[in-house]
Image (cartoon, rainbow, N blue to C red):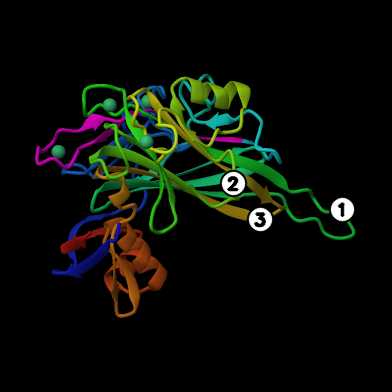
């Protein structure tokens, strides 16, 4: 699958709106925080909690994620998610041990149900903080539009708040944790919660687990949701599993079995391509990252993405396109534009607005040309 991509900017920045305050709460149903880039084809509206959890089964602090498929039918979003969250456990050397979900509301299989951290931000950006296992977590959640849909990026900066020991005191032992991303999608674009899906490594070497609305292969067009994780030490075995609800989730919470590195209902060899082709079922996904070790005062960043889109999974676009203007990386996305302006001090308008605590949203008109 060769793929070349050309992007060119047609117009410059148009300031759409300016918010007078950098911290605006967008309260959703219950205590959920609404992230949305709707309306429009390929957009998402979702109520997240302060841990990054969401889904229709997550209780009052979160909602389902509604995705408007790119199908030339305006405003026809459908629900996608029963439950999504990350889980944590004390670091294990053998990849085993039960997990605890970091989620509010009703939790997942009774795990979680924690008090919901407050989220503040904008419609496409929310930040919150909490503590778990002796570590401090700062979470940033962003929605970004892509060629094939919308990506939710959840970035957890995890810090050990302990002060390093001063010799001759004994060193403080590090805190070791494992993290897992769980996603039980119920894609309802076909009117059924039964789904297909699979696993692939994209051209950038990124492992993606997909839930789709179709049986087939990585080249079968469908509405899909994909998940990725990075950072930490990815185990070479027991790193992923695509399996039935409730078996996968209950094993994670109650049994702590290592993930099985398997795709249930994928035909046996020689077909074996890690995409479901035997029969649709109630699919759930999990990806684990083992081996975060944080000494006193140390931090690590863990990122998990949820990719909502249409098309063939093998053609998925995870992040929005970028342009390089005057040697500066220029993401074609409004929130990333703000970050770029702050990081590189490149755009005097954005920098000035950042200094005054204001947000400006710009729109770049661009065309994309994709060749396969
Ligand atoms: Ca649509
Ligand atoms: Ca379905
Ligand atoms: Ca297959
Ligand atoms: Ca499911």
Q: Is residue 130 left or right of residue 45?
A: right
What separation in Å lies between label 2 and label 1 (alpha carbons)?
34 Å
- Classify 3 as above or below 135: below
Disc number for residue 236: 2
Q: Which residue is mark 3?
A: 298
Extreme residue in the bottom direction: 326
| Quadrant that contains the N terminus | bottom left
* View extreme (right): residue: 168
The answer to which of 29 and 245 lies nearer the viewer is 245
Percent across and percent down for residue 128 are: 47, 43
Classify 32 as above or below 128: above
Horizontal arrangement in the rendering, residue 173 relative to residue 146 (left or right): right
Structural crowding at the residue carrying mark 3, measured as other residues with C-alpha within 10 Å and reported as few (<14), some (14–19) or many (≥20) = some
Callout 1 crowding tier (Cα within 10 Å): few <14, some 14–19, many ≥20: few
Disc 2, SS: loop
Residue 49 found in image quarter: top left
Residue 13 spot, x, y in % from top left:
19, 67
The dot on residue 19 is none
> SS class of the residue under badge 1?
loop
Residue 212 visible here: yes
Give the residues in magenta. Answer: 63-88
| Circle 1 residue | 170
Rendered position, 215 above or below 220:
above
């Amino acid at each position: 699958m060769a793929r070349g991509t050309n992007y060119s900017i047609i117009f410059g920045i148009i300031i759409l709106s300016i918010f007078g305050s950098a911290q605006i709460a967008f309260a959703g149903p219950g205590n959920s925080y609404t992230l949305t880039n709707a309306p429009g084809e390929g957009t998402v509206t979702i109520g997240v909690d302060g841990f990054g959890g969401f889904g229709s089964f997550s209780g009052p602090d979160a909602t389902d994620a509604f995705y408007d498929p790119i199908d030339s039918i305006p405003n026809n979003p459908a629900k996608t998610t029963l439950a999504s969250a990350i889980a944590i456990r004390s670091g294990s050397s053998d990849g085993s041990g039960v997990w605890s979900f970091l989620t509010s509301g009703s939790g997942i299989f009774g795990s979680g149900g924690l008090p919901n951290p407050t989220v503040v931000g904008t419609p496409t950006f929310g930040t919150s903080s909490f503590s778990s296992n002796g570590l401090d977590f700062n979470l940033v959640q962003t929605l970004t539009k892509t060629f094939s849909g919308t990506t939710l990026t959840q970035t957890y900066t995890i810090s050990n708040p302990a002060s390093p020991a001063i010799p001759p005191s004994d060193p403080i032992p590090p805190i070791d944790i494992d993290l897992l991303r769980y996603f039980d999608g119920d894609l309802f674009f076909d009117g059924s919660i039964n789904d297909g899906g699979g696993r692939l490594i994209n051209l950038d070497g990124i492992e993606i687990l997909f839930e789709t609305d179709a049986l087939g292969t990585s080249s079968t067009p469908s509405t899909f949701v994909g998940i990725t994780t990075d950072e930490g030490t990815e185990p070479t075995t027991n790193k992923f599993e695509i399996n039935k609800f409730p078996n996968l989730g209950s094993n994670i919470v109650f049994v702590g079995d290592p993930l099985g590195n398997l795709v249930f209902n994928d035909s046996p060899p020689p077909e074996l391509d890690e995409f479901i082709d035997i029969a649709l079922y109630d699919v759930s996904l999990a990806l684990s990252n083992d081996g975060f070790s944080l000494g006193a005062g140390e931090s690590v960043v863990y990122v998990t993405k949820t990719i909502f889109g249409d098309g063939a999974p093998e053609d998925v676009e995870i992040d929005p396109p970028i342009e390089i203007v005057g040697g500066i990386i220029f993401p074609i996305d409004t929130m990333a534009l703000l970050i770029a302006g702050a990081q590189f001090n490149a755009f005097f308008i954005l920098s000035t607005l950042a200094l005054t605590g204001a947000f400006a949203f710009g729109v770049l008109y661009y065309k994309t040309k994709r060749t396969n």
